[in-house]
Structure formats: structure tokens, C-alpha cells
Image (cartoon, grey):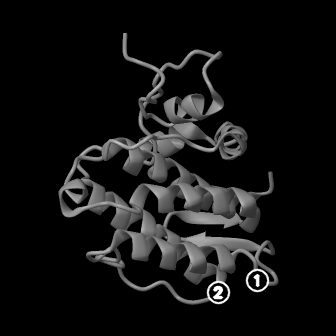
Amino acid sequence: MDSVTALERAYESMRNATADLGPAQMTAPSQCDGWDVKTLLNHVFGVGWMFTLVNQGQALGEDSGDVVGTDPALACREVAAANIAAWKIDGAFDGDRTYPFGSFPAPRALLINVGEIAVHAWDVAKSTGQDASIDSGVAALLWDFYNSLPLEAFREHGAFGPVVPVPESAPVADRVLGLIGFQPLAVRAA
């Protein structure tokens, strides 16, 4: 699977997860310590806009604040359309991209973008009592990508939590989630 298709599938999962969210679900705790679902959505949609602006050659401003508003489904559709389009423009894969957290070759930056959307779509779904999963093709791409990273350095900066043990026989999506510090649905704590 190519990375742009993976981003499209990740956003499809996010659209499904946000389609019918009500006010009570927005205050539910997420899988990210200390964040409720609305805080998580503001983070992930803000990140989507950040990747979009950088790809368009625009300067990044201050923290994007409340990008979710009262309609998370609309906010999701808007960021998804812009973010996906930004990876389809001429030159989208040329050179490096610089973000507040570092500079990366454009193809690797896209994989970071995919991971943010896919993992947080799973988080929103799980946190709001929906079926939570990551597309198996997206998960396979993320498994290879995350295993190419210096994960301990990312853990030191709080980007990922400690590894959650997951059997090698588990689906790749569960192994991805465990690798970056989440407890997948299919694996129960001992």
C-alpha cells in the first residue's frame, strides 16, 4: 500500500469514529493519559493542519486551539480533505519537511502523519465505545516504519509510551499499538 492511500484509509477510520460523537463522548477519557476525546481530537486535527500547511509552504502559527468546535465530524472532513490534498500536490515528496519536533524527508513525514491519524482514530473509537481497529494494510506500513525509528528517543520525549507486550501471533495492528505504548483491544493485561 502506498502512503497516500494509507492516509486516506486512516482518515476514513477517523471519519467513522467521529461521525456520531455527542457532547458526553467528547469528555470521555482517551487512551492518552490526561486527555479527553475533545483534547485528543484538537491535537490530531491540529497535527493534520500542521502537515498540510508545511506541505503548502506556509508558515506555522501558534497552537491551533479549538479546531474541533461543536462538530467533530465536520472538523474531521475539513482537515482530511486538506491534508490528503496536500500530499498530492506536485513536489509533495521532494526534500525535507521541518516541524516543531524536527526535520524529516518528506516520505517519512507522511508516515508520521499516517501514524498520527490511524492511531488516534483507533483511540477515539476505543474511548467512545465503538469498534476500534486499524486497517491491516495501514498497520503493516506503520509496523515497518515504527520499527525503523529510534523508539527509545521518542519515548524519552513522551511521543510513545512504554512497550505493552503483545504476542508475535497477534494481528499487526495490535503489535503496532503495543509497540508504541497502547493496550490493544485484542490483548488483555495479565
- Residue 158: tell me if it is visible: no
Q: Is residue 10 left or right of residue 93?
A: left
158 or 173: nearer the viewer: 173
Tell me which corner region of the image, top left, top right, bottom left or bottom right, holds residue 179: top right
Q: Is residue 88 left or right of residue 188?
A: right
Q: Is residue 86 depicted above or below 136 in this figure?
A: below
Residue 12 location, x and y as percent?
A: 57, 60
Q: Is residue 103 left or right of residue 91?
A: left
Residue 54 location, x and y as percent?
A: 60, 80
Element type where label 1 sits in the image: loop
Checking the image for residue 101, the label placed there is none
Element type where label 2 sits in the image: loop
Q: Is residue 17 depicted above or below 145 in this figure?
A: below
Cβ atoms at labels 2 and 1 below 8 Å apart: yes
x 64%, y 88%: residue: 57
Residue 185 location, x and y as percent?
A: 44, 29
Residue 125 location, x and y as percent?
A: 40, 47
Amino acid marked by disc 1: Ile
Checking the image for residue 56, the label placed there is 2
